[in-house]
């Protein structure tokens, strides 16, 4: 298991990401930041270069006559079924389009329908800021006060993640006033994987619509959106799906809504492919999620995503990926916990000396690939010093979340057990210097 699941990714060199005191500056860095931006697949690079070549040689003709069979008029037709398989969805339920927050607004505009008695949104506290902004603006658009209409669930005192029983109890208690339950599949800051199926079922039992932000879950953990009955979801593809910075997003809408929820904000890309260039004035949407498409997607972005999705397909999709993910993350956790600087999360509030804890759940079924390390004492600036040391002396790239957290995510497609060992070793070195 020393080799990655795929050797088809191009990792940055140590010298190019700020490593200056590492023996092999021209070697690949230890890249543990796929939860923020996935690495580049060689296939994606090739496909993007092919699209640039087609653009230079065929220009507008490429919409209908493409030497690689990826006509721009329906450029997502190859990516959609692969993404649907990762999501556990029917092809008709998935649209490769737009960006995460834009798709969040599009879906909320259809599914958030507050009335006098059922008008609240239930979410986790400290959701990703864009989600919080979207919730607040959608609530205000209906003339409601976010302080009253948004229920943000906080972990219990002294804890860092939400308990499943508390979420379900809140839905049970407040369900008659909740219009929409909308959580992150995997919480971006703590790395907690929420029980999507159970929360969805409880929400719907209480008459609520249930949607999910799957930015940190897609390509990270197994999903069965159709079978779980999830009403709608959206996500980005530049994290575990490796589509590149600002890569194209997606939305999912369960087939059960096909005859009930039509797009509120129509665009020409939402009509059948054969009719797009007929320029008809009446909007007749494609059945399913594709009808929510508005504008033609970037062929470059779609090619970058497709290249990575083909690697997923080659390795066997989410089964092998999840198996290796559990191995890597559990190994990294075990190595970190052997450090003399590690303390249990329950003790974090009392720590006065140099230390760190892990605020991500220890249960592999309650997390994805990510471990979030909280450095102590809080506000001491320790996190930044450790982060800088990881980069400069180890060529280890994680993700800093100021003021006190570093997120490390061993991505199963391209990370190895050696990466986990190296990261733990360099982190311990950094703490020894304090």
Image (cartoon, rainbow, N blue to C red):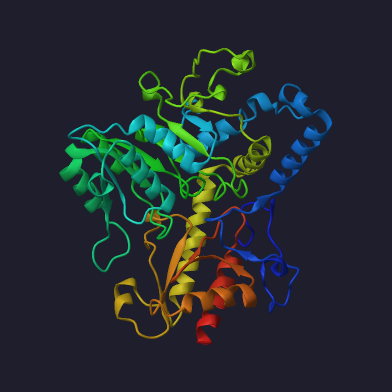
Residue farthest to the front, as pictured: 143
Question: Viewed as shown, does residue 116 lie left or right of 232?
Answer: left
The correct choice, above or below, for 357 with respect to 415 in the image is below
Pick the front one: 74 or 179: 179
Give the residue displayed 55% in from the left and 82% down from the top.
429
Q: Which image quadrant for residue 78?
A: top right
Give the residue displayed 56% in from the left and 17% down from the top.
272
Give the residue displayed 72% in from the left and 46% down from the top.
45
Pick the front one: 93 or 260: 260
The correct choice, above or below, for 141 with respect to 411 in the image is above
Numbered label tally: 0
The correct choice, above or below, for 234 with respect to 8 in the image is above
The correct choice, above or below, for 351 with respect to 118 in the image is below
Question: Viewed as shown, does residue 130 lie left or right of 301?
Answer: left
Residue 375, position as x, y percentages in the image:
43, 75
Residue 172, position as x, y percentages in the image:
18, 43
Q: Is residue 235 visible?
A: no
Q: Which quarter of the rendering shows the N terminus?
A: bottom right
Residue 295, position as x, y percentages in the image:
58, 29
Residue farthest to the left, as pictured: 173
Residue 396, position as x, y percentages in the image:
60, 69
Q: Is residue 83 visible?
A: yes
């Amino acid at each position: 298991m020393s080799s990655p699941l795929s050797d088809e990714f191009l990792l940055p060199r140590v010298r190019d990401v700020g490593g200056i005191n590492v023996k092999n500056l021209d070697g690949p860095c230890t890249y543990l930041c796929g939860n923020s931006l996935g690495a580049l697949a060689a296939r994606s690079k090739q496909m993007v270069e092919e699209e640039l070549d087609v653009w230079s040689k065929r220009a507008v003709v490429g919409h209908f006559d493409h030497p690689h069979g990826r006509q721009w008029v329906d450029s997502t037709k190859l990516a959609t079924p692969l993404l649907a398989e990762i999501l556990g969805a029917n092809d008709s339920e998935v649209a490769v389009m737009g960006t995460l927050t834009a798709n969040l607004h599009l879906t909320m505009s259809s599914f958030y329908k507050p009335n006098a008695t059922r008008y609240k949104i239930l979410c986790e506290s400290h959701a990703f800021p864009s989600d919080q902004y979207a919730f607040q603006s959608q609530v205000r658009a209906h003339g409601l006060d976010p302080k009253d209409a948004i229920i943000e669930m906080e972990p219990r005192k002294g804890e860092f993640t939400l308990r499943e029983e508390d979420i379900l109890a809140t839905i049970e208690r407040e369900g008659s006033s909740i219009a929409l339950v909308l959580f992150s599949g995997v919480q971006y800051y703590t790395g907690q994987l929420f029980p999507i199926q159970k929360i969805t079922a409880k929400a719907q039992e209480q008459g609520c619509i249930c949607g999910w932000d799957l930015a940190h879950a897609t390509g990270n953990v197994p999903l069965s959106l159709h079978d779980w009955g999830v009403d709608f979801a959206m996500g980005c593809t530049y994290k575990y799906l490796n589509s590149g910075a600002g890569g194209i997003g997606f939305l999912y809408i369960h087939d059960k809504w096909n005859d009930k929820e039509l797009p509120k904000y129509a665009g020409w890309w939402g009509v059948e492919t054969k009719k797009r260039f007929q320029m008809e004035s009446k909007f007749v949407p494609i059945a399913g999620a594709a009808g929510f498409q508005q504008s033609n997607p970037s062929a470059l972005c779609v090619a970058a995503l497709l290249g990575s999705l083909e690697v997923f397909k080659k390795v066997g999709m989410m089964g092998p990926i999840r198996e290796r993910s559990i191995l890597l993350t559990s190994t990294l956790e075990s190595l970190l916990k052997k450090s003399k600087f590690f303390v249990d999360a329950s003790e974090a509030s009392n720590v006065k000396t140099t230390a760190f804890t892990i605020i991500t759940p220890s249960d592999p079924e309650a997390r994805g690939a990510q471990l979030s390390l909280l450095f102590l004492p809080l506000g001491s600036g320790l996190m930044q010093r450790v982060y800088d040391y990881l980069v400069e002396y180890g060529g280890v790239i994680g993700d800093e979340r100021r003021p006190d957290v570093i997120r490390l995510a061993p991505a199963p497609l391209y990370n190895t057990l050696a990466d986990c060992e190296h990261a733990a070793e360099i982190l311990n070195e950094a703490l020894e210097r304090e």
